[in-house]
Each structure stands twice: as structure tokens, then as C-alpha cells.
Image: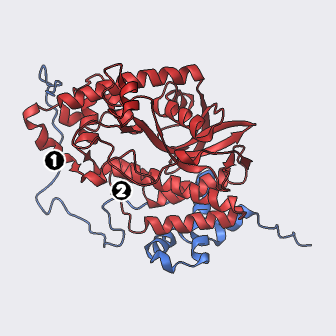
Amino acid sequence: MSELKISSEHLTTGVASCFLPGTNIQYAYDSTSIGYLKTCPRLYQYIMIEGWGSRDESVHLRFGIEYHSALQDYAIARSSGASHEDSIRDSIRALVQRIHGWNPDTSNRAGRYKNPRTLLSLVVDYLDHFGDHDPAQTIILDNGAPAVELSFRFELDFGPSTAGEDWKEGYLEGRYPQPYLLSGHLDRAVDFNGQAFVMDHKTSTATISSYYFDQYNPNNQMSLYSLAGKIVLDAPIKGVIISAAQVLLEKPNAFQRGFTYRTDDQLDEWLVDLRHWLTVAEQYAVAGYWPQNDTACDKFGGCRFREVCSKSPSVRETYLKSSFDKLEPDERWNPLKSR
Amino acid sequence: MTNPIPEPNIRDQILTQLPAPDELDELMSRDPMDLQSRDIDAIIAYQRKQRANREAGIKAPRPKRGVNPDAPKVSLDLSALGLTPKPAVTTPTKPGAGLRRI
């Protein structure tokens, strides 16, 4: 494994609200919440502002979290000198303990593909596939830990109320004390052929082809992760390696990796665009209105709120309540939550 | 002269010596804190066996949804119930019948 210095000041602990107190102005963003905002302000409203969640969504989320945790446990065991077999045993033991009692509804497609049995199968298959023969080597941090599941957080040089050009002056004078924060989780930082990359694990039920990887450039999440990798690792990160796993029920699970690169100019452009997006988000919050983007409803297999948005505004609340759960504030998606 | 007994390869060992499919359910249903290392090994071995089966094109038997395989089989006499199947009748399609209000 490679050794690289890491800036621990950018790693996060603790949880706070991602909104300015008493407002709907979000100051801490991750790729997920930026993605909602860019996709459709109404989608952003339903999830980030109002906290609606669906049962199907939790299956995907749980499956992804447990898959990531299992691979992390394996990497930690390997970095301590354990063999492949001992490491896989540690990882599976912890996984079985975590998912005990998890019983998703397997009568629907989400639960049929993503459940404890398919999860165990995917983890064992991935670790047997890449565990002992991974051309990408996990970077070892200066504290000796492997660079896996790194929660990061860093400030931008602008913040809410940026419509005026005096924000920086105001920030220095303490009038605008809260800059925007970007946060997230890097699955793994790796050395691949002498170059540093962020690695992001994806699970999918779709076929993994070149078409699958095309979706990651341009891509909001991968641009943020490239930027974060440069800041957190203080290294010339080339981009992101997407390590994709396809869950299959009758054929062997399939694994493919793809590269997506970002130049400094591309990352600068992404930040300039982000500044505009966050300014607009603040305007929505001040106005208390998040408009529909009705050109996005059919994207990614169809928005989960499409049926709700297709109804007359006067009855939407009823449809929301019948199909979704309104989560408590501390259960909602929060970019400041560390894993 | 006798033929030498071939040494079983790893795949054969996996296919012949590992737990039956329903053993995974049994292992997963236990209190995970009670699982021994051999139980974890059995779970891993089960997954490897499944992978080997899939690679060999052997489909795992799956119970049909909503069907209890242990239930007694019953044959129904529809004519005794006055439910003799009628011949299918086709109706002409009305103009506009394929349109659906959304």
C-alpha cells in the first residue's frame, strides 16, 4: 500500500443541522443534496426541506451502506496485516451482525435484488475478485490507517447572502460568519500505476457497460469527489475510479471499473457553476418556493415523486402521505452526518 | 489394472462438501453473537458454492412466490362445481379503445 499525507483537519466528526438556524437556507451541501437541487428544486424541497422518504429508497440506501462498510472492514483488516481469508471472515462476521433482523420486502424488485442474501453474495464475490489481486492499492494515511471511508468537510470562500459582492469583506468583518461547506464521504483513496485516484463503489442492477460509465462525465458527484480528493489528500488527484458491482440473481455478480478524469479547469468551472446554483437555492429558500423542473421527471427511470407531482397541487399532500414517510429532522438526509 | 482416482479440484470440493442452500437461512436466523468461526466460514463457503454454480450455469431452485411447497396437492373438478370453462369469445375493438386517460 502507498503512503501519502492526509490533512486530518478536513475529516469530520459530529453532527449539526445543515441549515442556518430558523431558515430553509442550507449552508452545508454534499453531492446528494446538490444533485437534488440541480435535478429539480421540487425534488430538493420534498427531500431536503420537508424530509419525505420512501421505503424502497431505504432498501437501496441500506444495501449501499452495508456494502461499503463490509469493504471498509476488509481493507482495515488487510492493512493490519491479516490474510485475505482472515480479513474476509472479519468483514462477513461484522456484516452478519449488522444486518441481523434486516428483512426487506422481497416481493418487489428493489428487495428482490437488494437483501441480506444478495448482499452477502456480492461482498464475498467482490472480495474474492479484487481482494488479493487489486491493481489499485489503498493509500495509507500518515496515522497508519487505510484511506477508506473518509468523511470530509471543507469551506468555500463564499457563503449565503452572496448576491452582494461584499460577502468576502463581510465575512472578514464577521457580518456573514457562515461560509458554505462541502462535505461527503470518499470510499477509498488509491494509488493506481503511480497516480492517485479517489475510488467510488457503486452497486447496480443494470448492465455495466461503457454506456454505464459515460454517465459519470460530466457528473456532479465525481467532480466534487475529485475536488475533495485534491483538498483532503493534498495530492494531484487525477479523478475517480468507479468500481461498479452488478447484482445478478442467476448469473455470477459482475464487476467492472471505469475511470473519470477531471482537470483543474474543469473543477474551477464546476465551482463557478456551484456558486450560481447555491445563490439560486438561497433565493428559493427566501421565497419559500421551489419550482418543478418538469423536464427531469422521467430521468433515471422516473422520479420517485412523479406520481405526486402529476396530481393537482391541492391533493399532493394526500398523495405524499400515502406513499412516503415524513422523517423526523434527525433522520433526514444530512450532509454533516459522519458515517 | 485400475484407473487412478483423480484428485478432486477445489471446485468439486466446493460443490460436494458445502452446506445445503437452506443452511444459510438457518445460519442467518441465529443470534449473530452466537456464530462461531466455522459458521462464518460456512456462510462464505455457501456464497462461493453459489458463485461456482452460477458460473457453471446451474440455477438455484427457488420456491414460487406465494406457494407453500409442503401444502397437500388438491385436484379440482370444475364440471362438478358447475364451472366448466366456456369457449373464449373475441369482441371487436371499438375505435379509441386503445387510448387511456392519464
Q: Colour of chain B?
A: blue
Residue at horizontal 59 percent and vertical 58 percent from the top: A124
Name the colouring of the figure. by chain
User: Looking at the picture, does residue A24 appear above or below residue A14?
Assistant: above
Q: Is residue B52 visible?
A: no
On residue A321, which mark appears? 1
Q: How many marks are shown on the rendered structure?
A: 2
Looking at the rendered structure, the kind of residue marked 2 is Thr
Question: Camera-side residue: A95 or A327?
Answer: A327
Q: Position of residue A255 (x, y in %)?
A: 59, 44
Apparent side of residue A47 relative to residue B1 in the rendered image (left or right):
left
Chain in red (letter): A
Which numbered disc, 1 or 2, marks the residue that appears first in the sequence?
Answer: 2
Callout 1 amino acid: Lys
Find residue A64 and report its horizontal and vertical position in percent: 46, 50
Q: Secondary structure at mark 2?
A: loop
Q: Is residue A338 above or below residue B102?
A: below
Q: Residue at x 57, y 75 (%)?
A: B39
CB under 8 Å between discs 1 and 2: no
Residue A158 vs A95, above or below: the answer is above
Which tag is nearer the camera, tag 1 or tag 2?
1
Q: Residue furthest right?
A: B1
Q: Residue at x 16, y 48 (%)?
A: A322
A139 to the left or right of A152: right
Location of residue B86 in the rendering, given as x and y in whole percent from the top left corner: 15, 46
Q: Nearer the viewer, residue B12 or A25?
A: A25
- Read off the residue under disc 2: A106
| Res A178 → quadrant | top left
Q: Is residue A38 left or right of residue A117?
A: left
